[in-house]
Every structure is written in C-alpha cells, then in structure tokens.
Amino acid sequence: MAEKKYTENLGLTQQDEEDFVDGAEISRSFRVLDEKVWKNTVDMDNAKQELYKKIGNIETNDLFGYTPETITYGDKGYLAFGYKDGETQSFTYLTSTNAKEWQNVGYTDRIKHLEYLDSGTYIGATNANMIHYLYGESGEFTQFPTSQNWEVNKIKAFGSRALIIGSKIIRAYMDYALDLYTLGVLPDEPLIDIVKINDEDKFVGCTEHIVYEYQNLIGSGTETQELIFEKNDEVISSILFKDNRLYYTTQSGNIYRSEPEHYTLMVKVAEGFETGKNKLIHYSGMFLLQTEHNVYTSTDCKEWKTTLTTNKKFNNAKYVNDKFAICGDEGVKFLSIEKSLKEQVNELNSALYPVGIVLAFVNGFDPNKSLLGEWEPIAKGQTLVGVNESDPDFNTVEKSGGLKDVTLSIKQIPVHSHQESDLSYVYTDEHPANNSIVTTNQNGRQNINMNIKSKTYTKNAGEGGAHSNLQPYITVFYWVRRK
C-alpha cells in the first residue's frame, strides 16, 4: 500500500499516524510530496518536516540600537519598550505599524510588562508598583497614580481586563479611566504566572513552588483560591494551558504536562534545556521556549529544535500579530510560522469544497474517504431547486416538497361537460303509481296526472388512480459537505 511505503520510509510512529494519518488522508498528502521524496530531491528528514508546522522567516529589527524588554500589538500598531547600553536609566517606547519602520515616541519608566486590552488600552508596569497606560488618541503613556506597594511579575490580558500579578493580584480595566482593584485572594509567596483555563472565570496561577486554582478573578463573585500541588524540588518558571492540559517549565530545564483536565497528574515530557528562567508560549500549533541564550520550538512539546541562539541575551518572548516576537540585546526577532502540509491540504480542500457545497457523482464515490471534512448524502430521490425568497415554496435553503405521484382532486380537474343520452318514458295504467291521480272526464275517458321525479347519469369511466408527476431525469449521488 502507498501508506505503508511512506510511513516506513519517513519513520512515522503510530502516534504520528493517529495525529495525521487516517489512511486516505496520508495518500492525499503524500501525493504532494511524491516528486520530492521519490525523485530524491530532498532527504527523508526534510520530507517528514513538511508534514508539520515549522518556523519560517526570521526578521530582525534593531530598534535604533535600543534593547527591547517587551512588545505588544494593538489598534495603534506595535509598541515596544527598551533602553540603550549605558543609558539604563533612560527608557523609551517605540511604535510601528509594520514592525519594520519604528518611531521613538518618548521616554518613560522601565516598562517590563506590557499587554493590550480589547478596550483599546495598552497597559504596562515596571517591576515595582508603577502602572502606565495609553488610551485613546493621546499618543503618550500616562502614569497611573497609586499608593499601593507591590512587586509586579507579569501582566496577562483577558479581553477588556487584565490581571497584574506578583505579591498581589490586581484586576485592571479601562472604561474612561484606568481602574485597579486588589483582589482578596493572595498567595503565600508572589505569583510569577497565571493562565485562564476555561470560559467560566477559572484560572491557574503559580509561585516558584506552588500551583493554585482560582475562581472569579475577572468577573463578579467572590474570589477563591485552592492549592493544586506543590513542587519543592524544582523552581517553576512559567505555565501554559493548551487543549485542556496544563504545562509548566522549571529553571532546571524541564517541561511537565498534565493529563487532560487532571492538573495534579503532571508528567515530564521534555528535559535538557538551558537552565535558568524561561518562558513557554504557544501559538498556531507551535510551542516556543525562550531561555536567556536560546529559543527552542516544537509542534508537540516532546521533540524540540533549537531555533535561535545568542551570545548576548534574550529578554522576553510573546506572540504578537500572528508571529512570535523575541526581545533581546540584538533587537526584536520576528519568527513566522509556516503552515504544515496538512494545513495546506485543508486550506486547498476548503477553498475547492467549502462547507455547504453539493457534489454529484455517477458512481458510489464516498467523499468522506478522499476529501477532508464531513459529508453526508442529500436529496435521495429528489431534484434540486434554486432558492427564491419571494416564493413561499422555495424561500429557504433545504426546504423540501413536491410529490412523485399525484391523484387529481375535483378542483384540479378542468371545467368540462358530458352529453346525456335521450330518455323515453313508457306508461301503463294497470298499476298507477302511488303518486298518480286517476279521474274520468265527461267523455268517459280517464285522465292520469303523475308527478315524475328522476335523475339522469352518464355512464361511469376511469379508475381514480394517481398519475406520474416526474420530469425526464437521470439519477446521481448527491453529497453535501456539513463540516
């Protein structure tokens, strides 16, 4: 079989086949690779990589020589904060609409944490309690006056609100002015990261050794905190939630992953990374781990590839505007993600056969076996009619009606008449009818007066059966793509 030929030569595991191969699908996908693989234009490792996502172009922006510490993207475009060597007390923020041409907008405090809210607000924080925000058309960051004193480790945006975490949990949101609210739930030691794990205002946050579950941090209701587990043998560096699994990294260079929806069952899935603080993020099917001197990427969080290395320092990693952005001493490096062969096949399939399309075949071809998506038979024993919004019989899609056979009703029979046969009456007076009156006149003759009532009928014809209502036809198999 073609599938076996490919799986053996590419070394696909059983899990690979479950994730990517469904029999017919690998045949379709490898038809695209066929010339490359079997004409030896690339080696097998490269051919296998084309099945999966990979990092594409890497673009570097030096930001006028500034060292960026953080970056984000919003309605005003890209926004980055950085400093120059020897000028660590003077920090600037820079803006760009295309991530290539940058403008030095102004100076501010050392913003190390930055997010964009759906309300149109950029919100930043120093490592101390200095909060800044950019809102509306001002074009300049405003320092938010606060007397609160806390250590800030990270800002995470959740729609129009943000959580500022550290020695406190602060909820921030912007209506007409920035508002900060200190939540009642506080960890025993500063939080270093937090993630949202479902749509019911549930979160998981962590300190360097303890992982908590939280409720009601950005909505209404009383905030709650519940311990999930402690990790005292290693120092936690970052956490991530993806596909109902919780991931966390440690400064020992290890990555752990939970079972789906069972966050206490953590298993080590990768190890051997650069030790020290790190950050794990995910976007569009690609995991990225940033350490001080390396950036690693993976599609499954098990097998990793070193994508970037520096002799200087990487400060931060984020995904902004469909790209990974790595901030460091050499500027910002933007990493694009190339689509996997499977995604390319999916996109081509969806472009050719969008959801809702109806195909006709004159054989028993089942599109579920060769085309992506979910297909089902439609219009068995029926013909197709175009929608006409002004006709109540045809005003909505997939409305059915009509009859194969029809028996005519009286209203459907055309107006017509029948000629009656001539009638003759024979009279005898031997037994006059009950309704007759017999009298004798003066001439001795009898008069018979009769009241005759009668109905006349034509002779019956026809059998009252139904007639065929079919137009000339040819039968085909109709299939509609539902998903």
Image (cartoon, rainbow, N blue to C red):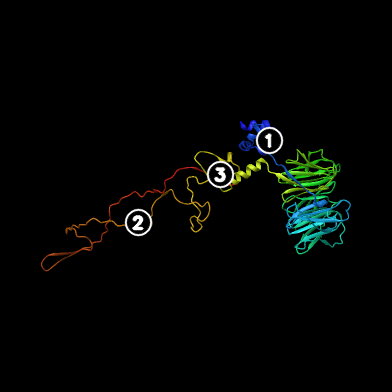
Whether residue 67 is visible, yes or no, is no
Label 2–label 1 contact, CB within 8 A = no
Location of mark 1 (residue): 47
Amino acid at pointer 2 = Pro
From this viewpoint, is residue 59 visible?
yes
Residue drawn at 89 percent across, 52 percent down = 86
Q: Position of residue 398 (x, y in %)?
A: 52, 51
At 39% from the left edge and 51% from the top edge, which residue is drawn?
407
Which amino acid type is marked by label 3?
Answer: Glu
> In this rendering, is residue 21 above or below 163?
above
Label at residue 376: 3
Query: What type is the residue that disc 1 sits on?
Result: Ala
Which residue is nearer to you in this view: 219 or 138? Answer: 138
Spatial distance from mark 3 to mark 2, Cα to Cα? 43 Å
Q: Which residue is mark 2?
A: 414
User: Sequence order check: which comes first, mark 3 or mark 2?
Assistant: 3
Query: From mark 1 to mark 3, how far is it between C-alphas?
Result: 34 Å
| Number of residues whose C-alpha sits closer than 10 Å to that of mark 3, classed few (under 14), some (14–19) or many (20 or more) | some
Q: Is residue 18 left or right of residue 248?
A: left
Alpha carbon separation for disc pair 2 and 1: 74 Å
- Name the residue located 63 percent from the left edge and 34 percent from the top edge: 35
Rendered location of residue 241, percent (x, y): 75, 47
For the residue labelled by badge 1, is the local secondary structure a helix, a strand or a loop? helix
Q: Which mark is residue 396?
A: none
Expressed as whole percent of the image width and height from the top left, the position of residue 375 reads 57, 44
Q: Earlier in the sequence, mark 1 or mark 3?
A: 1
> Helix or strand or loop: what does disc 3 sit on?
strand
